[in-house]
């Protein structure tokens, strides 16, 4: 049996023991929060006193600010003859584009903000020579012939003269 004199001492011992026991987890929580204070100290725009009062989500927002990284883009157009043209630029895909050859009407090319336009070889001309049309009879003066090739120009047309024959330069 415990004497009445030792009861207050025992109660005090229990309270101190319980305080120590409960104090250990609190001290480990304080140690666990220490890195968060270090993270806040890295932020140059805030003073350490301000960081001590910041909520954990505020500290994370400072650390997770988006950083834009410069990239590069490449655009390659396929040419009708099996070759390719390639353009490169710093930036995103908006800084590069391409169009493949689709002859006879579309000459391939690429474009980039750093290099400008680069073209595929011209589409081969399937139009007959204008020499083949020159002098052929035509129905109405002032009208034009079908498309013919004059030198490297594949979209040339001869004109019907008042004498009723196509004239080509």
Image (spheres, helix red, strand yellow):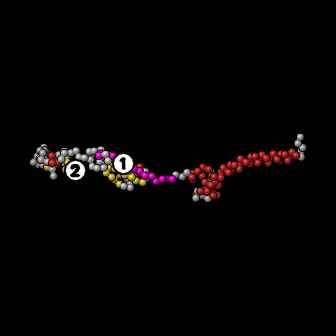
| Residue 37 lies in quadrant | bottom right
Give the label, 1 or 2, closer to the camera: 1
Which residue is drawn at the image coordinates 74% and 48% (left, top)? 23
On screen, residue 56 versus residue 17, left or right, reads left
Check residue 76 for magenta coloring. Answer: yes
Residue farthest top in this picture: 1
The crowding category of the residue bearing disc 1, from other C-alpha atoms within 10 Å (few below 14, some 14 to 19, many at least 20), is many
Give x and y (percent) for residue 164: 11, 46
Query: Which portion, as a residue range, is magenta?
Result: 67-81
Residue farthest left in this picture: 163
Which residue is drawn at the image coordinates 90% and 43% (left, top)? 3
Identify the residue position indicated by label 1 in the image. 76
The crowding category of the residue bearing disc 2, from other C-alpha atoms within 10 Å (few below 14, some 14 to 19, many at least 20), is few
What secondary structure is marked by label 2? strand
Q: Nearer the viewer, residue 89 or 49?
A: 89
Q: Report the Cα–Cα distance between label 1 and label 2.
A: 26 Å
Which residue is drawn at the image coordinates 65% and 51% (left, top)? 33
Identify the residue position indicated by label 2 in the image. 153
Q: Nearer the viewer, residue 17 or 79?
A: 79
Residue 109 seen in the figure: yes
């Amino acid at each position: 049996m415990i004497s009445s004199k030792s009861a207050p001492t025992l109660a005090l011992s229990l309270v101190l023991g319980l305080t120590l026991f409960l104090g250990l987890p609190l001290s480990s929580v304080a140690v666990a929060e220490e890195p968060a204070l270090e993270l806040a100290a890295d932020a140059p725009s805030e003073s350490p006193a301000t960081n001590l009062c910041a909520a954990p989500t505020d500290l994370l927002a400072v650390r997770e600010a988006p950083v834009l990284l410069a990239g590069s883009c490449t655009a390659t157009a396929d040419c009708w003859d099996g070759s390719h043209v390639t353009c490169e630029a710093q930036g995103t895909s908006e800084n590069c584009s391409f169009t493949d050859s689709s002859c006879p009407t579309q000459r391939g090319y690429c474009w980039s903000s750093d290099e400008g336009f680069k073209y595929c070889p011209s589409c081969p001309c399937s139009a007959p020579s204008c020499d083949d049309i020159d002098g052929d009879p035509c129905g109405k003066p002032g009208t034009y012939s079908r498309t013919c090739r004059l030198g490297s120009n594949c979209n040339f047309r001869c004109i019907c003269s008042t004498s009723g024959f196509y004239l080509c330069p």
